[in-house]
Image: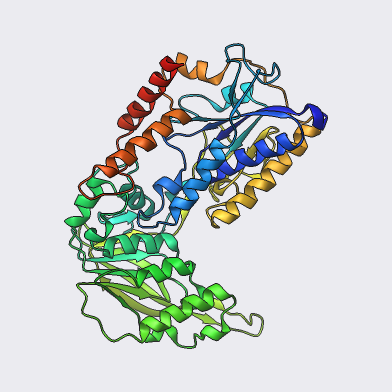
Amino acid sequence: MSTTSLSLRVAIVGAGPAGIYAGNLLANAVKERGGRVEIDLFESLPAPYGLIRYGVAPDHPRIKGIVNSLHEMLDAFPETADGDASTGSATQTASRRTIRFVGNVEVGRDISLDELRERYHAVILATGAIRDAALDIPGVDLPGSYGAADFVAWFDGHPDVARTWPLEASSVAVIGNGNVALDVARVLAKHPVDLRSTEIPDNVLEGLESSAVTDVHVFGRRGPADIKFTPIELRELGEVNDVDIVLHDEDFDGVDPASATNNQLKVMLRTLNGWRERPAGTASRRLHLHFWHAPVEITGDGKVESIRFERTAFVKSETDAEGALVRTGEFRDYDVQAVYRAVGYYGTRVVDAPFDEARGVVPNEAGRVEAEPGLYATGWIKRGPVGLIGHTKSDALETITNLVADAEAGLLTAPTSDEDVLDVLDAGGTEYTTWDGWLALDAHERALGENHRHTRERVKVVPRDEQVAVSRDAEHESALAR
């Protein structure tokens, strides 16, 4: 296939940052080659943006900038005129968006992976990771032991989780030393009045207002020099109103900010040491940071009542100058009534796609799915749930570079069906949503925020059927107007 005649139809499964970056990069790459591409971006939720909308605490204003950037990417490519016979369908109109958002569609339920592969030159899996990774210790299934991902989904108004959350615990343990652990801890410790100006759903605000929490304990297996936070996440903890940060001097023995391996860590260690020097506080709530704690067991009579940890340490040897993390045999018990496990995420598989159960990823080589020509992966489902937004973009670039190279080398099989996938979804009764529908839902949520008793930028619509109704009603009105 020559670069001048590059003409592709591509499906992307997942409309979070990974999928949107991939679509944007692909559209630009083909455009630069003078070719044509039609991209359908499938999302199981009615709205786009994935974990940016449903996986980040609502009191992070900088996330708005990421949403705006993703919005611009999806809105950057207007309708293409005069459908191309090699990529268009018999039922398709003379023009369509280069990147077409198709929401409220779960691949494997509403349409199969095989049906997609019949209609596209390539399919990119970008489903990310929304489930909690397992923590294999006794008592982990006791009532009162929760996955952090589930709690985050609740306070972000995910449509597929319960509207209420049990918040009777006064002392809570959060296991993990990453940003998700800090988000969970901060939302639990923060006074609800300080969340009223955010886009937090009303049902969540009401739940937090009835919370009994006074003490939140965050535990990490390693020491302060190995934290996985980002400086801004850590700094936000010290800015929470009427919440004292509690640290323990024994955790900082031998920790010198000057020996930090990078500037970000140096800043965070200085922040932690600054908190250590504060006089004892008198706040009504406390957020305790513990290091060198490996979880051993959650105990209780029918519900969580305490958690046991074993102290850890780095031990150097002649063959390992940096040291290895070991357990010391010293145990600590903490009386808590709830445990939140923020030990990582696990990949979201797609029905009939290859999947590595142990790693929670689609097996691939630089984005090419093993033994599946024309099938690609990007984002967390490709590399595992590690890295920030910047990593996701570079990751997508690698996948798209290889996809385009395969197309130019003639390695992609042409679609065997010209039927528009929307016709397939219509025939199956799937109430899919579109980009116009999302714009209407976005405007609707912003209007709810303006009219709310506590003025906000938006108030999220939580129920799935309500999101779909707002989106599809707007789409219907738009179609009638045309």
Whether 168 is drawn above or below 294: the answer is above
| Residue at x-position 71% and y-position 19% | 86
Report the residue that reaches farthest toward the right: 2
Whether 137 is drawn above or below 94: the answer is below
Of residue 365 and residue 452, the one placed in the foreground of this image is 452
| Residue at x-position 38% and y-position 28% | 471
| Residue at x-position 49% and y-position 42% | 348
Image coords of residue 377 (percent x, y) = 62, 41
Image coords of residue 328 (percent x, y) = 44, 80
Residue 448 relative to residue 36: left or right: left
Q: Can residue 413 be seen in this view?
A: yes
Whether 320 is drawn above or below 458: the answer is below
Q: Can residue 461 be seen in this view?
A: no
| Residue at x-position 53% and y-position 42% | 72
Of residue 426 and residue 340, the one placed in the foreground of this image is 426
Image coords of residue 206 (percent x, y) = 19, 50
Coloring scheme of the render? Answer: rainbow
Label count reads 0
For the N terminus, give its image quadrant. top right
Quarter holding residue 158: top left
Quarter holding residue 421: top right
Of residue 57 and residue 360, the one placed in the foreground of this image is 57
Of residue 146 and residue 377, the one placed in the foreground of this image is 377
Report the residue that reaches farthest toward the top: 90
Image coords of residue 80 (percent x, y) = 63, 25
